[in-house]
Amino acid sequence: MSIRHYTPRRRRHGQLSPRANGILNSVFGIAIVLQVLYPLVNGEVLRLLTINVVYWGAGAMLLHALLAYGARYAITYFFFTFFFALIIEHVGLLTQWPFGNYSYSGNLGLKIFEVPLVVPFAWIMMAHPVLTAARRIAGNWVFLYGGVALAAWDLFLDPLMVAQGNWTWVVTGAHVPFQPEIPLSNTFGWLLSGMFLIGVLHVITPREKRKGGATFVTTDTFLLWTLFSGFVGNLFFFSRPGVAFFAGSIFGIVLAPYFFNRWLGRP
C-alpha cells in the first residue's frame, strides 16, 4: 500500500481517549483481582486486603463517574455519599438506629467518630453503580429501587465482615434468614438509608451522560461481578450455601430488570 494512500485512524471527536480508558480499566481490574484473592488469604494479609478492596473499588467507581458524567457529578456524589455514610453510621453506633446494636472492631484501621474511615468508601463503591441502574429502569421510583438494591447487596456484605471480626451485632429479636448473627433491623436500616441516599443523589447530581464519556460496561460488570462473587464465594469458599442462595436470589431479582432492559437496548 502506498504511503500516500494511508490515512491514520484518529480518535473520534468526543470519544473517551485510550489513555483515560486504559486508566479506568486498570483501576477496575486491580479492584477485581483483589476481590478474587479475598477467599485465598487469611490473617493480617486478609485484613489489609479487605481495606484495599474497598478503596480500589471506590476509586474505580469514582473514576467512572468522572469519565462518564463529569466533575460536577463525581464531586457531588463523592462528598454527599461520604458524609451521609459517616453521619448515619455514627448515629447508628450512638443510638442503635436505624441498623441495630453493633460496634466496629479495630480491624478496619483509622476511625472517625468511631466509624472506620474505609466504611464510607464502601458506600461510595456501591452508590454510583446502583444509581445508574435505578435511573435507567425505575422512573419516579429511583429512590425505592436504590434502597432495595443496597439492602440486597448488604445481605452478602454483612455476614462476610462479621465472620472476619470487623464488626459485631447484638441480636435480641428477629434475624436475617440464614444469618443468625445479624438482626433483621440491619436490612431495614439499609433499605431506609439506601432510599434516602439514592433519592438525594438522583436529585442533586447531573443525569445526562457526557458526550463521548465512559460507557456503562464498568458499572454493569461490577454489578454482575458482585452478584457472581457473592454467590460463588459463599457457596464454595465460605461454606454458607444458605447465604449464597438467599442473598443471590434477592440481589439477582433486583438486578434482573436492569440487565433485561440493557439487553433490549432501550434508552
Image (spheres, helix red, strand yellow):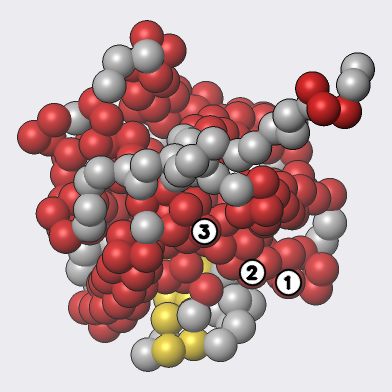
Residue under label 2 = 51
Decide which of tag 3 and tag 1 comes sooner along the chain.
1
Q: What residue is pinned by disc 3?
A: 63
**Residue type, numbered disc 3:** Leu
Gap between marks 1 and 2, in whole Å?
5 Å
The alpha-carbon separation of the residues under discs 2 and 3 comes to 18 Å
In the image, residue 212 sits, relative to residue 80, either above or below, namely: above
114 w.r.t. 257: above or below = below
Between the residue at mark 3 and the residue at mark 1, the CA separation in whole angstroms equals: 22 Å
User: Mark 1: which amino acid?
Assistant: Leu
For image coordinates 66% across by 46% down, the residue present is 18
The quadrant of the rendering that contains the N terminus is top right
**Residue situated in front as seen by the camera: 4 or 51:** 4
Secondary element at tag 2: helix
Residue 46, picture quadrant: bottom right
Most distant residue in the left direction: 140
